Amino acid sequence: MLSDISLRLAPGSFHFLTGPSGSGKSTFLKLCYAELAPTAGRLTLFDRDVRSLSRDDVALTRRRIGVVHQDCQFLDHLPLAANVALPLTVAGRPSVAADLSDLLGWVGLGQLAEAKPPSLSGGERQRAALARAIIMGPDVILADEPTGNLDWEMSLRLLTLLVELNRMGKTILIATHDLNLIRQAKSHLAARVLRISKRRIQLAGADL
Amino acid sequence: MITARSQTDRVVPPSGAPATLTSFTAGAMTFLAVFALALSLASGRLADRWASALDRTATIRISAPDDQIARQTQAVLDVLSTTPGIASARAQTQDEQRKLLEPWFGPDLPLTDLPLPQLIEVIEAPEGYDSEGLRQRLAAEAPGAVLDDHTRWRKPMAEAASRLRLLGVLSILLIGAAMAAMITLAANAALSANAQVIKVLRLVGAKDNFIARAFVRRFTLRAAAGSAVGALAGTLGVALLPAQDAAGGFLTGLGFSGAGWLLPFTLPLLAGAVAFVATRVAAFTTLRRLT
């Protein structure tokens, strides 16, 4: 799927990963949160080789990486608040109701804490996924087509949240084929754009 | 504050049929285990009773013409009094012999008209006696005397009781193994049905131990609860069996005695332990497979 990749995401950087559908954007993200392992070469996460990580190490590494999945990946039997607090739950850390409420309010879902995921709109689900991705205070946030199901207004709102997080020092990588979103982001911050082409990842030029 | 512990149990959705199956299986198996336990304990008591009643006794039967009975009886008693390992010996009276025969022939048996042998009851001393040597001396002193040390029929009875006890224990072990197998199948079904939940939990950083714990806790509690109901029902069933009666023999002695009535209530703990181990093994095996 991908080959000859050599890149490093610097802490605090903001990257877009673009390319046509099926080019390997999601595969690259999966490599970044250790759902997939490279078949050849070396992949390090937080300076540790992925191949040397035990199953528990992989779990601990994922706690430092917040992921916004394209299909959100919620537990439909739990209310939204419990889904957002899930990373804290699995880490054995208590979630403070007030903090959780603040976070849901920050992503504009304060009134939907008890709603079940299937009852939410696409935009609400994407924002809830973002809230879940950042609740542990991760160092890195990965987002796979986070605006795929959103209208332009909602896309900008989500982008604004991600830009805000980047300004807090988080490393952001967004896989998207939405060039308008990328242009909009580049007008606000120094985002770098990586393009997947012919199974390789290259730094895109300024022609976007 | 929302505690992590209260959330842990909720991350896995209700398991439906597999969890219900676990409760039912644990209940049914425990119900059967109570009867196996009762059988095993009753067999043990029976074996002990037979052993203690017969182990230290023997009977000497004297069949001789009327005019020789008294002489041979006295001769036998003399031999016994000088035999090492014999604690006591005495000839049974006619009344005692009548009581022995009463269940079969009724109270009006004309004992004096019947050619019945004279019975001598022998109580063995703890160190025991040489039965072969005694037989030879009896043959010399009282040709009509025959020593019956009960070995001939005591041994197979004691063996039968021991085997019955062993079968009871084996049944309990098999019931435990069958319950473990059923709970393993139910846990595997629940784990397979929740593959997507497991995937999500892993994506947000759950360790295998956390995921396994959610399933193990649920199945352990289900099994223990089902087993408690089964233990209660089984104990009630045993309690409702007819009380022990000499005429009823072994079957009416099937039950618990004294502190033994508490034993069935240890079964839910065992069922919980079996479920804990079975679910934990199943969970970790499945989680290793679901990479």
Image: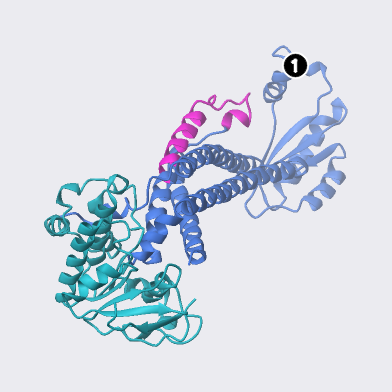
Q: What type is the residue that disc 1 sits on? A: Phe
> Residue B50's spot in the image, x, y percent?
64, 40
Residue drawn at point x = 64 percent, y = 44 percent: B51
Main SS of the magenta segment?
Answer: helix
Assess whether residue A113 is covered by the magenta stretch: no
The reply to whether residue B77 is visible in this rendering is yes
Would you say B45 lies left or right of A105 here?
right
Which chain letter goes with mark 1? B
Residue drawn at point x = 45 percent, y = 68 percent: A22
Outermost residue on the top side: it is B108
The residue nearer to you, when weighing B15 against A142, is A142
The residue nearer to you, when weighing B127 against A160, is A160
Report which quarter residue B77 is drawn in: top right
Mark 1 surroundings: few (<14), some (14-19) or many (≥20) residues within 10 A = few
Q: Which residue is mark 1?
A: B105
> How many marks do you count on the picture?
1
> Residue A138's spot in the image, x, y percent?
24, 72
The chain assigned the colour blue in the figure is: B
Q: What secondary structure is marked by label 1?
A: helix
> Residue B208's spot in the image, x, y percent?
40, 65
> Residue B62's spot in the image, x, y percent?
81, 34
The chain assigned the colour cyan in the figure is: A
Report which quarter residue B116 is drawn in: top right
The residue nearer to you, when weighing B103 against B164, is B164
Q: Which residues are magenta?
A: B224-253
Name above or below for residue A67 compared with residue B25: below
Outermost residue on the front side: it is A207
Residue drawn at point x = 47 percent, y = 54 percent: B191
* Figure quadrant of the C terminus of chain A: bottom left
Name above or below for residue B112 compared with residue B194: above
